[in-house]
Image (spheres, rainbow, N blue to C red):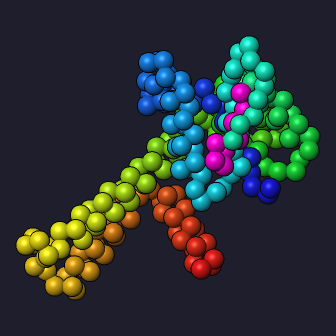
Amino acid sequence: STLPLLLVDGYNVIGYWARLKKRRDKGNMAGARELLLDDLLEFNSPKQYDMVVVFDAVGQPERVDNYFDVAIVFTPSADLYIETELRRLGQEGAREVVAATADKAIQVAAQVHGARVMTTRILVQELKESRAGVQVFVDEWNQREDRRAARGMGTIWAALDDDMRTQLDHDLHQRAWNSLPRKQREALEASHAMRSELA
């Protein structure tokens, strides 16, 4: 693949983000992992990275799973795995590599081997913005469907003519669009453009 490779220090992110940390602290580590993977998939749509998320599995043999479009590695030491991959990929020099972690040793290893560093704080901020953008569109969709369901039921919506309904739909969509972060708008525009080309 020619896409950059994003190596994510999984438990490092879970420990940083209160939303995931709460699950972990209540003993639901699997739930915290799944939320992280779902958020990464959302963030990576349309696809900007090949992603590998690495989790510590002390005392277990290394194994690789897939979660939709994300590779998941369970390994005795996530730090050692990521550092080894950074060295290998740096020697190959075939693609851009990004390491997402707050671990200073991994950040240094990334820089030594020519990879970029995305701090955990930055990654979590990106994930939060991605979630917020998706929620705006879900809310807008639900409101539009509620209005459609209300037609013909003696509501104010039912009393409006078609032009007024179209204008209101447009205004609500524009308001939702304008509330998105710039990066999310660009990602959605790129996604729509790709769909148009395929159609």
| Chief SS of the magenta region | strand
Q: Quadrant of the N terminus?
A: bottom right
Q: How many marks?
A: 0
Q: Residue lying at the far top in this picture: please name it.
A: 59
Is 71 drawn above or below residue 147 in the view shown?
above
Does 193 sit left or right of 50 as displayed? Answer: left
Residue 182 rendering spot, x and y as whole percentages: 48, 59
Is 119 drawn above or below residue 62 in the view shown?
below
Instruction: Using the rendered image of the protein, determine whether residue 181 is visible from the camera's viewpoint.
Output: yes
Is 172 drawn above or below residue 166 in the view shown?
above
Q: Quadrant of the C terminus?
A: bottom right
Which residue: 63% across, 77% down? 198
Which residue: 87% across, 40% down? 90
Residue 109, image quadrant:
top right
Residue 135 rendering spot, x and y as whole percentages: 38, 52
Which residue: 19% across, 82% down? 164
Taking depth in this image into account, of 72 and 119 the one nearest to the observer is 72
In the image, residue 72 lies in the stretch drawn in magenta? yes
Does 127 sit left or right of 99 as displayed? Answer: left
Instruction: Using the rendered image of the protein, determine whether residue 112 is visible from the camera's viewpoint.
Output: no
Q: Residue lying at the far right in this picture: please name it.
A: 91
Q: Residue lying at the far left in this picture: please name it.
A: 154
Residue 157, image quadrant:
bottom left
Residue 114, image quadrant:
top right
Is 29 drawn above or below residue 165 in the view shown?
above
Taking depth in this image into account, of 150 and 119 the one nearest to the observer is 150
Residue 155 rendering spot, x and y as whole percentages: 9, 70
Taking depth in this image into account, of 189 and 166 the one nearest to the observer is 166
Residue 103 rendering spot, x and y as whole percentages: 66, 25
Does 105 sit left or right of 169 as displayed? Answer: right
Which stretch appears magenta? 67-74
